[in-house]
Image (spheres, rainbow, N blue to C red):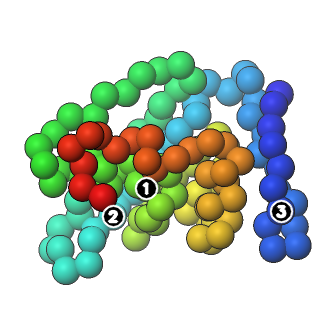
Amino acid sequence: MGGSSWPLARTTVRVVVDAASAIVVELSGVVFSWPAVARPVVNVASLRIARGERVFLRGPSGSGKSTLLSLLAGVVTPQAGAIRMLGTDLTALRGAERDRFRAATGVSPSRYRSSSARA
């Protein structure tokens, strides 16, 4: 097992990665809508990504690719559902806690931006 720690508002949280666990990302019932948009841009009933698995996101402009990556990075939070990364429920963390989780795990939203993405 490997892991890292970081302080969270007078508490130390330890991210423990079980080497035997095959699932590193799991979404369940995730729904996200931008303000003033009638329908959800992301609506994922279930998604599991295993350790070592490669995923390619493809879709037209505005289909939710960057929004999904922002959800996975904890930059935005869904209106419904749960997002677990490395065993941590990102939807249960507050903003600063998500920032610390990103720092401890090396997850960076800028890594996912394509060269044509808008800032």
What secondary structure is marked by label 1?
helix
What secondary structure is marked by label 2?
strand
Separation of marks 2 and 3 at Cα, in angstroms:
29 Å
- Rendered-image quadrant of the C terminus: bottom left
- The label number, if any, that marks residue 87 in the structure image: none
The residue type indicated by label 1 comes to Leu
Q: Residue at left 62%, top 51%?
A: 102
Foreground pick, 13 / 45: 13
Image-based side of 69 in relation to 51, left or right = left
68 vs 112: above or below: below
Among the two numbered marks 1 and 3 on one chain, the one whose residue lies closer to the N terminus: 3
In the rendered image, residue 24, in percent from the top left (x then y), is placed at 58, 34
| Dot 1 and dot 2 residues touching (CB under 8 Å) | yes
Separation of marks 1 and 3 at Cα, in angstroms:
22 Å
Report the residue marked by disc 2.
32
Q: Residue at left 17%, top 74%?
A: 37
Report the residue marked by disc 1.
71
10 vs 90: above or below: below
Among the two numbered marks 1 and 2 on one chain, the one whose residue lies closer to the N terminus: 2
Separation of marks 1 and 2 at Cα, in angstroms:
9 Å
The residue type indicated by label 2 comes to Phe
Image-based side of 101 in relation to 57, left or right = right
Work out which residue is located at the far left of the displayed protein and give it.
60
17 vs 43: above or below: above
Among the two numbered marks 2 and 3 on one chain, the one whose residue lies closer to the N terminus: 3
Of marks 1 and 2, the one in the foreground: 1
Report the residue marked by disc 3.
7
Q: Tell me, yes or no, if residue 97 can be seen here.
A: yes
Of marks 2 and 3, the one in the foreground: 3
What secondary structure is marked by label 3?
strand
